[in-house]
Amino acid sequence: MNLMITGFFCYILGMLTVFVPKRREMWAHYLAQGATILGSLCVFMSAVVYLLTDMSSPQLICVVGNFSLEMDGWNAVFLAITGLGGIITGVYGLGYGIFYQGNRLRILSSLFTTFVFSMVLVALAQDALGFLLAWEIMAVVSFLLVNHEAEKKGVWQIAYQYLVMTHLGTAAIMIAFFVVGSGAQDLQFSSLAMETLDVGTRNIAFLAAFIGFALKAGLVPLHVWLPNAHPAAPSHVSALMSGVMLNMALYGFGRFIFNFLGPVEFWWGLLVFSVALISAFAGALYAQMATDMKRILAYSSVENMGIVFVGMGTGMLLLTTNHQELAMLGFVAAIVHAFNHSIMKTLLFMSAGSIMHGMSGEKNIEKMGGLGKFMPKTALFTLIGAMGLAALPLTSGFVGEWLTFKSLLHLVNAQAGTGFRLLAAFGFVSLGLTAAFALGAFVRFYGIIFLGRPRTNIGEKAQETSGSMLIAMGISSFLVVAMGVFCAPIVELAIKVINKTLVKLPALTNNLIIMPQANTDAGVYAPLALAALFIVLAVILYGLTYKKNLLVKSDVTWNCGTVSTNRQQYSATGFSKPVRRAFGAILKPIRQKSYLQKSHDYFGREVLYKLSLPDRFTDNLYQPMQHWLVKAAAFLRQIQTGSVRLYVGYVMVAMILVLIWGAMYRG
Amino acid sequence: MEQLLILLLAVVFLQTRIMNLKNAIVCLMAQSTIIAVACFMVGMESNIGWHSFLPAILTMVFKVGVIPYALFTLVKKLTNEQELESNINANYSTAASAFFVVLSYMLIDKMLPGIGSRDIVASSLVLIMTGLALIVMRSRAIMQIVGLVTVENGIYLFGMAITEGLPIIIELGIFLDVLIAVVVLVILTKRLSLSFMTTDTNVLQKLKG
């Protein structure tokens, strides 16, 4: 308890650094980041300490009036995620903030601290009002952070879009809370959980909660703000937004499902499952297409939150069957993947920041290339992160996805009849496709940025980052590998959380290898054995090739006798061409060819080729909606002529009508 | 009391016919004076010490004194003292007033059958509705302020009839509210005449985006 309060004080100290005089800007920055790191360390430590106990009773942090802050199993997981994210991005921010010197740095740093603090409060709040308050602070602070570089082109529009969208989400969550709390004495979580509601009310509450939290998590089609907002924010902020803030949506959704809404209905699970699958698929597909480095990562977040929610959906579906004990695996998969995704995504956003810094602010991967030579350490860390997000074995990304697949497998046997089997098949196919896309997207991400030769001359002058930024990326990449190889404790912890505090399900056996179910002999993932095998193979290969010059010496690529230029490399757009072709029906790319004049007698006309990918969700869903809204407003405008007298007339008519209605009602 | 109410209704009817700004304010003064007298009579009946007369005194000071004074000083500075709408408009508002009298009595008989202060409640409703009608039908800002004070008088009369004396703190609150509203309105009207060279509120429609 004391540790957590200490963390709070650190955060508050960090928030106060905005009052440090301007000429001591860097002091303020270091103080704020230091406070964030310390505070997050406290939060992380206390969450982990709590997770390691038997979690039999919630731990009270503090009580202020009617508001109380408590830690139970479910939020301890997210506090750990927030704490870890805060530590890593805080360390990174120490160095990264230097680039914002003279550019409202004090505000950036103190808002950063506030952002972490608000997320801690979201996780800890134990009543609806406190939760909504913290949620709203989180939304507004992240809006301000997205808007930090408002002088850049298009940033404020993006920030505005984010603000509007996030408020729609908050409205939905508010509705959900009030529907759930319609019969309760107060809005404390404990009294909300006690209440029993009828099916209709629960359905409305579920729908509102799902819309609200899906918007924050960036599930399709409510994700449109995400690929815009994340690239606009400073890198350590987008790392935090993508890695931690999105998980807060999972936290809130889990609260509703496990604590407030009572028994799960079948269609809830089906809705979550399908929306999540579509998100995962669309996110991965668009991640393949984007050329803005941070946009790729943002779409990858959509994909990964999709996978997390597939786990949730599978768990919810299984809860409606007779085999409730199988549901555990889906929820465990969600927790594990959320945790791992937060580390990986933080890492990759941080390396994106380093690359941007090295490339003097360039975000377009088409203009990069060959950076591995100039930034070897960043390249290594990015490789590890990219491997994780592509879900390769021995990295942490694999564990969560593997567990999700395992839980999908349980759908097959959960119930007689073909319905669940069809669902499982559907899930397998689309998740498999998603994983393949993700692999492609990150091969492209790493390959285009770090391999080959520089495509522009900015790339030739790229510099390796140094100091705290490398340390932060190093910590993250170490964690990505460590969590991948020693994943069993994490999974065990997740199982414990689900078991002790949420749904009461029988424990499943588990040891250093992951074996989700004792009675099935198939489907065991033993990362340690794999790692050992990998090391042995590597040693053997190295021994065989050592000083034997087996590898061909490198030379310039043969290019039909001419010297190859940098522009002849595989481009990012070219790399994703096959996928764009194959999924043209979904993506609907717009290709424009315009013929210019002849510049040489012996050659044909010059051709200008333009390729653009429309944002189909914006074009086909949001634009018509906006159009419709404006039309509706135009109808309303007829009543609002601007004449004050007419307005008073409306009041008078309303008053007289109410009086007459009252008289009639009485008589 | 009945005679007083008849007088009040007569004044209200007169109010709907007046198109000259100064006369309208004088009429408003008369109306407020009648309300003050009514307050005084209620205070006499309740007989709970000196502060039962406080409402009457406050009404006299604010609605007969301060507010008309502010309006008069404002009117002096304006060049055009006439309401712009035509006489037909006056006929319509008088007819509306007559309709409101009937409607009010019908409503009272339906909603509060057998109430002792039937006439007071009905006249207060007439006052409220007529005040609103004045705001809607007149376009000069001063006339609309007059309408607002009429509404306020009606509400006050209604409160008096229903509760037989509100707590002192609420009375004070109401009076301060009205006073400040009117002061603000007077200032705004002055600004209006400075900016647009007229106090016709129709020009405000131009401000709409």
Image: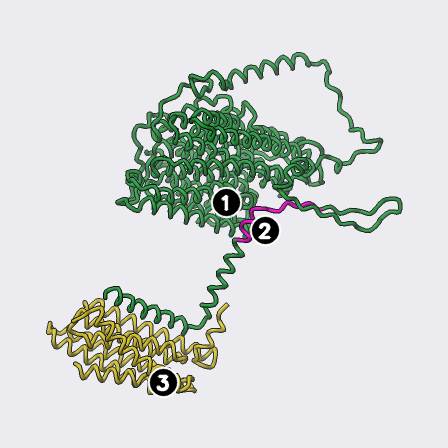
Chain colours: A green, B yellow
**Do the residues indicated by labels 1 and 2 lie within the same chain of the protein?**
yes
Q: What's the residue type where badge 1 is placed?
A: Leu
Q: Which chain is disc 2 placed on?
A: A
**Above/below status of A140 relative to A278:** below
- Three-letter amino acid code at disc 2? Lys
In this figure, which residue is indicated by the disc labeled 1? A222
Front residue of this view, candidates A569 and A237: A569
With B98 as the anchor, is A567 left or right in this view?
right
Residue B74 lies within the magenta run = no
Quadrant position of residue A656: bottom left
How far from the left and from the top, in percent, is residue A469?
55, 35
The span picked out in magenta is A610-624
**Inter-mark Cα distance, 1 to 3:** 59 Å
In what element is the residue under mark 3?
helix
In space, the residues marked 3 and 2 are separated at their CA atoms by: 63 Å
Q: Image height check: is A580 above or below A632? A: above
In front of the other: label 1 or label 3? 3
Residue A244, above or below A522: below
Could you say whether the residue bearing mark 2 is in a helix, strand or loop?
A: loop
Q: Residue at x 33, y 83 (%)?
A: B94
Secondary structure that dominates the magenta span: helix
Chain under label 1?
A: A
Q: Which tag, 1 or 2, sits closer to the chain's start?
A: 2
User: Could one spot residue A301 in this view of the protein?
Assistant: no
Which numbered dot is residue A152?
2
- Please determine whether, in this image, residue A323 is positioned above or below residue A14: above
Counting labels gives: 3
Callout 1–callout 2 Cβ contact below 8 Å: no
